[in-house]
Image (cartoon, helix red, strand yellow):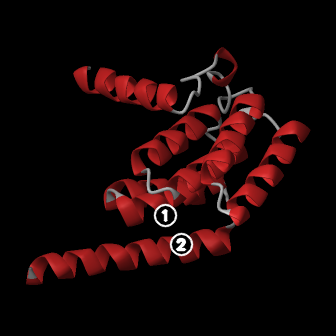
Amino acid sequence: MGVRLAVLAALAALAAAYQLPLLPDRLVTRGTVGHEPPPITKKARRLHKVARAAVKRGEWNDALQCYAAAVEDSGAARAFLLLALHLQRLNDHAAARAAFSRGVVADRTDGQLMQAWALFESKYGSMARASSLIKRAVKLGCDMDSAECDKTSIMARMRFRKKRRKFC
């Protein structure tokens, strides 16, 4: 139980640092049986366009604010995905992991989000977590061709890491 409290405290600290709500009430029940995940709103789509333009100009903080505002506005899995990928671009892996986690809590049925989180974990985290996430993504029926391709690359990374450990 102590580990869960520590994780929640870390998520709360990250949410406060990026001025995001930890888990708004409207996100708690999404992705469960009988609840439809929220569609992305028009405002969130506009914010994503503005964020993409800011990234192209190299204005990373402006883009971060836009992605965070899109998450706040819609709470859709796609908004969490784009926020997490931008945080990864900024090398803020802990915050990216928290964004992926919050996105999965918001919508447990989004295979793309699971797939992206699996790839993230295969690069920066636990291979066991990456493997379980990609299996969940495949079960959810995300694009099977790309998921299988990504599953293959994750498994190849796992074999490479095991071989590297033997020689080091």
In the image, is 23 to the left or to the right of 67? Answer: left
Along the viewing direction, whichever of 65 and 26 lies nearer the viewer: 65
Q: Depth check: give the residue in front, 146 or 25.
A: 25
Categorize mark 2 by other alpha carbons within 10 Å: few (<14), some (14-19), many (20+): some
Residue at horizontal 68 percent and vertical 43 percent from the top: 67
Answer yes or no: do the residues labelled 1 and 2 have beta carbons within 8 Å? Answer: yes
Q: Position of residue 32 (x, y in %)?
A: 65, 29
| Horizontal relation, residue 125 to residue 142: left or right | left
Residue 79 lies in what quarter of the image? top right
Q: Quadrant of the C terminus?
A: bottom left
Residue 29 in the image: state x and y as whole percent: 65, 22
Q: Is residue 131 above or below residue 157?
A: above
User: Gap in Å between the C-alphas at discs 1 and 2?
Assistant: 7 Å
Amino acid beneath label 1:
Leu
Which numbered disc flags the more N-terminal residue, 1 or 2? 1
Residue 119 image label? 1
Q: Which mark is residue 150?
A: 2
**Vertical arrangement, residue 120 with respect to residue 163, above or below:** above
Amino acid at dot 2: Asp
Q: Residue at x 64, y 73 (%)?
A: 146
Q: Position of residue 31 (x, y in %)?
A: 66, 33
Residue 115 visible? The answer is yes
Query: Residue at image x 40%, y 45%?
Result: 94
Q: 160 or 67, which is in the foreground? A: 67
Name the mark nearer the viewer: 1 or 2: 1
Q: Secondary structure at mark 2?
A: helix
Write down the quadrant of residue 12 in the picture: top left
Q: Using residue 63 as the reference point, say whether residue 6 is left or right of it.
A: left
